Amino acid sequence: MPSPAERPVLVPILGDQLTRTIASLRGRTKDDTVILMMEVWDEATYVRHHKQKIALIFSAMRHFAAELRDAGWTVDYVELTDTDNAGSFTGEIARAVERHDPRAIHVVEAGEWRVQQAIEEWPDKFSCDVEILPDDRFVCSLAEFREWAEDRDSLRMEFFYREMRRKTGLLMHGDGKPEGGEWNYDSENRKPPREGLSAPQRPLVEPDDITRECIDLVEEKFGDHFGSLENFGWPVTRDQAEEAADAFFAERIECFGPYQDAMVHGQDDLFHSMLSTSLNLGLLDPLDLCRRAEKAYEEGKAPLNSVEGFIRQIIGWREYIRGFYWLQMPHLQEANALNAQRGLPEFFWTGETDMRCLADCIRSTRDNAHAHHIQRLMVLGNFCLIAGISPREVQDWYLVVYADAYEWVELPNVAAMVLYADGGKLASKPYAASGNYINKMSNYCSDCAYSVSKKTGEGACPFNSLYWHFMDRHRDTLESNHRIGRVYSNWDRMGEDKQAAYLETAQDFLDRLEPADKGWAREQ
């Protein structure tokens, strides 16, 4: 039997930990380390993920394993179809312990609550030492976020974001003042799309043999899952992700800010970076991306409002959402402050709706496993909010359909930002809007079967009546909110007949919604 010093350290690397400098590898030597990577059925099916999402993660994992082997590391890689695959992380750890008899297991904490709960059981399940390391690939540690949040009545992202600007020095002067004199240039980033607005095509990565194998595997094993694999072109290596970042900084960041809220039918990406999948897999470093954006501004290649908006999405929103998730779990999963109980409509899976905005967003989601943030918030999410769709069903849908969706980023965005299900801990108001907002910020309404200018009755845009139906049924909860209280003054001035027309139109629409089979999202 080998002595403890001769036994290796087992380093499990999860599918969203594809970073060469990850804490569990830092300081390790190649001759006494076994890296374990696992494709397991539990992770591929805890919800019925979009086909592109599964193919992306498996391909990125296999490429990362190959890079590690080329660099001289010992990698024990378990493929999904391996005969003895245990189907779970814990089961595969147990098999690896039998194979390698490690003196210790070093693992970085999981990004998702349910996986972390499993990892925290490993010290009691295995005879070797288990060391769980913090994930320091973020600017703000979880302990630091808890300290920031402690004793605060309001957890507004803007104040957290300013702390991250001070911490990183991004777009900051030596005297502690922000570049340009303002912290936030969001007011300059709300341009509606002009006629003929289009953006340079983002580079699509041609699938190589490894990716093609993963695509074939997904078609074979998960062929009945939502989504199409035809347009698969995601970066699956760090080099490919860096090339995608190069293209964004060279071609799209200049117009990213002004048009980040714009929506154009058939223009799925516009000026968005499309880097979130690579960030969330660990292929790109968030702080490095922010410094590259800052450099683009300093060199005169991008305006301040675009660069600040990009940086805010990463060190502001992304960091804040992660901290908020861990602060609010596990009860955030069940939050339903507005008591929304309606089932998710079937058209969220089929795309078969005459509402042109929803049809286009769902088509892009199906074809690309992506829709940009305003489509997610103000079209798809706005509909779910004002129609009173069950938070758990909406959360499952978002987690299934987007390639960049992991629970730590998806759940707080959907439960708290989109649906106001947390009662306002995150958002200062529900992001409810009528068809007017969609008409202002897109070209969806021009050729829609519904008329955005018609408020009630047959042919009226459903968003118009649903908005007032939502406001009316939640008046007791929302009227005291200083950001939306004036809405009720407008409602009261309408008179009973007009109010009744709105409510009847909305109720007629809601009564005709066909709920989806829950088997779309989870195995039943």
Image (cartoon, helix red, strand yellow):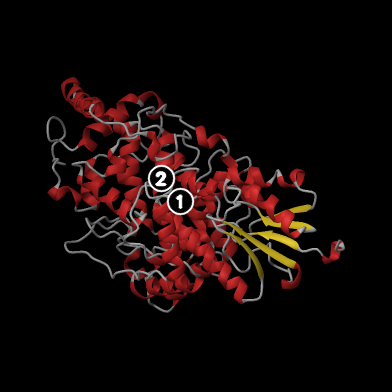
Q: Which mark is residue 260?
A: none
Q: Are marks 1 and 2 in contact (CB under 8 Å)?
A: yes
Q: Quadrant of the C terminus?
A: top left
Q: Residue 428: x and y, percent?
A: 44, 40
Depth check: give the residue in front, 250 or 120. Answer: 120
Q: Residue at x 20, y 25 (%)?
A: 508
- Above or below, 515 against 298 in this view is above
- Residue 273: image quadrant is bottom left
User: Dot 2: what SS?
Assistant: helix
Residue 174 left/right relative to 102: left
Q: Residue 297: x and y, percent?
A: 42, 73
- The residue where tag 1 is placed is 405
* Residue 20 appears in the rendering: yes
Q: Earlier in the sequence, mark 1 or mark 2?
A: 2
User: Dot 1: what SS?
Assistant: loop
Q: Residues within 10 Å of mark 1 (few under 14, many from 20)?
A: many
Amino acid tagged 1? Ala
Q: Residue at x 43, y 42 (%)?
A: 414
Q: Residue 182: x and y, percent?
A: 44, 60
Amino acid tagged 2? Tyr
Q: Quadrant of the N terminus?
A: bottom right
Extreme residue toward the top, this view:
496
Residue 223 left/right relative to 514: right
Q: CA distance from mark 1 to mark 2?
A: 7 Å
Q: Residue 38: x and y, percent?
A: 59, 56
Depth check: give the residue in front, 176 or 220. Answer: 220
- Above or below, 458 against 327 in this view is above
Depth check: give the residue in front, 174 or 276. Answer: 276
Residue 117 left/right relative to 103: left
In this figure, what is the number of numbered marks?
2
- The residue where tag 2 is placed is 398
